[in-house]
Image (spheres, rainbow, N blue to C red):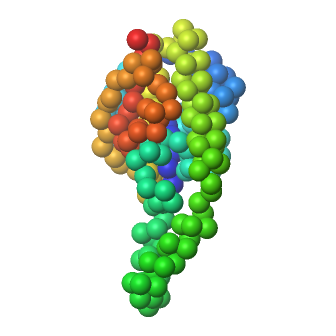
Amino acid sequence: MCHYITCTLPASVPWEPVDRIARAHHRRLRPLQNASIEARIGSQRRYFATTTGMCDCGLPFGFRLRAPGETRDSQATAQRLAKKGWSPARIQRALQQMAAAGERTAAQVESSVQEAASNWIQLVNAVLASGLTPEFGLLYHWYRGGLDESMAIELQPVALGALDLGLLGTLREDPLYLFRPA
């Protein structure tokens, strides 16, 4: 289905002022309920959606962990074409052609990734610099259904000083990265 980036804040933090900061950085905070996440983060944190659009697919989180042109849709497309009776060789050619058609030049990809990553880095820095919260958590997940689907996550503390393009490019799906000032 889609990637989404969600976030957490300490429950004691009023989220509306943090939402104003998020909106200045092209995101928003919308309270979200997910029983599996809430069980893991406990009552000391609250959970929020951050997207302003349909989803967060194509954002720079984990981009260095994927092969060029790789998408989650490739497997689904291959299964759909196999059901139509396509041969494995024909399916492989079709996937290669789709990947080639979808790829942009290296310079365009790098520019796009840097711009999106810069927005996230500025947002996390602004939230923590505001003094409103001692922690800002980000969770990157591939949702197969709704945002309330059950998932297992691990908490991963990260010093704010480590937040850069390199870190965003290697963020894995499903740890809840808890950014805190160093």
How many numbered tags mark residues here? 0
Q: Quick check: can you spot residue 29?
A: no
Residue 135, located in which quarter of the rendered image?
A: top left
Q: Where is residue 85 in the image (x, y as percent from the top left)?
A: 44, 91
Left or right for 4, reference 75: right
32 left or right of 79 in image: right
User: x and y percent of residue 141 in the render?
Assistant: 43, 46
Q: Residue at x 49, y 37 (%)?
A: 6
Query: As rendered, which of 165 and 139 lies closer to the eye?
Result: 165
Q: In this view, does 135 lie above or below 29?
A: above
> Which residue is situated farthest in the right direction here?
24
Indicate the position of residue 22 as horizontal and vertical percent values. 63, 27
Query: Which sits in the foreground, 52 or 63?
Result: 63
Quarter holding the C terminus is top left
Q: Which residue is painted at 41% across and 39% down in the image?
A: 170
Query: Could one spot residue 121 in this view of the protein?
Result: yes
Residue 26, quarter of the rendered image: top right
Q: Is 42 left, or right, of 160 in this rendering?
A: left
State the residue at coordinates (59%, 50%).
106
The answer to whether residue 113 is above or below residue 138 is below
- 111 up-or-down from 124: above or below: below
Residue 21 on image: x %, y %: 64, 22
- Position of residue 13 relative to residue 79, above or below, is above
Which residue sits at x=38%, y=42%?
172
Q: In this view, does 19 lie to the left or right of 148?
A: right
